[in-house]
Image (cartoon, rainbow, N blue to C red):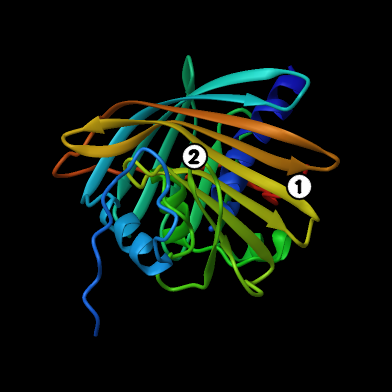
Amino acid sequence: MTQKIYQFRWIFISFIIILLIISGCKSVSVLPSKTPINNIKIKELGNEISKAKLNYKNIRSRIKTEYDDGNRKQQIILNLRMVDKKAIWISATMLIPIGKLLITPDKISFYEKFQRTFYEGDLTFIKKFLNINIDFNDIQNILLGYPILNITDNKWKRISHPKFYVLSLSGKAQNFTQTLFFDPTNFLLMEQRFFLKSLNQNMTIKYNYFQKVDGKNIPRNIEFFVPYDSSYRKLILEYTRVDFPEDLNLPFTIPDGYKPINILEK
């Protein structure tokens, strides 16, 4: 039983860390194509990618998750609710409710029922752990299939590829480098790769499928490959029952008697 409790705790905490890590001329319209256009300019490509970004007020989804640490697999159901630029709320269940997570631009809070523990703080612990700056908008971007860095605000170089538009961040960007893969038929993000200099390791996020909901493109399946010690951990998110309600309720209260924890403690 102790091993199962420890395993769940790391599944839930790993999910949080993955989310946090991972962080006057008229423009020319670029038509979608089956293969990448060779002479497209970075600015023009960035404009089309920006047009593909989802506009929403609230979003709600049920997410099937599968966590694989190389030795065992575990499945958890997540109920996700997001208010654009304001809040990310997640309730986790394994037959019964087992924990909740609430992230706002200024704060992250989480509690789990197995060991009756909780965490409250800001996002600075990610900078201490990975030596990179991650903010609230980066987390929402990852969950919705967008780059954590703006294409039009940063310096990118184009890498030739027969199937995708591939952009790599040029110059010295913080303490990580990033490579992006976009589908030329719709300018949706297919993959983000990060090289974390502080860990000397790569992290990869793959957006394998997108789905149309009320005319909006939403990820259907996301795979995270995250470095851990000398190996990797894998997390798969499968979005189901997606909708865009006018209002959302985000109930969150840490129960009495729960003990605070260090979120990075093994």
Helix or strand or loop: what does disc 2 sit on?
Answer: loop
Q: Nearer the viewer, residue 230 or 206?
A: 206
In the image, 22: left or right of 82?
right
* Residue 135 visible to the viewer: yes
Q: Nearer the viewer, residue 133 or 150?
A: 150
Residue mark closest to the camera, 1 vs 2? 2
Q: Nearer the viewer, residue 197 or 122?
A: 197
**Callout 1–callout 2 Cβ contact below 8 Å:** no
Whichever of callouts 1 and 2 sits on the residue coming sooner in the sequence is 2
Three-letter amino acid code of the residue under disc 2: Lys
- Position in image of residue 231 (x %, y %): 81, 36
Q: Quadrant of residue 235?
A: top right
In the image, 137: left or right of 33?
right
Q: Residues within 10 Å of mark 1 (few under 14, many from 20)?
A: few
Three-letter amino acid code of the residue under disc 1: Glu
Q: Quadrant of the C terminus?
A: top right
Extreme residue toward the left, this view: 246
Helix or strand or loop: what does disc 1 sit on?
Answer: loop
Q: Residue at 43% x, 48% y: name it.
A: 102
Q: Quadrant of residue 75?
A: top right
- Position in image of residue 91 (x %, y %): 43, 33
| C-alpha separation, residue under disc 1 versus residue under disc 2 | 42 Å
Q: Quadrant of the N terminus?
A: top right
Q: Nearer the viewer, residue 61 or 254?
A: 61
- Position in image of residue 138 (x %, y %): 47, 58
Looking at the rendered structure, which numbered label has been put on residue 163?
Answer: 2
* Residue 253 visible to the viewer: no
Total numbered circles: 2
Q: Residues within 10 Å of mark 2 (few under 14, many from 20)?
A: few
For label 1, the residue is 265
Q: Residue at 65% x, 65% y: name it.
A: 132
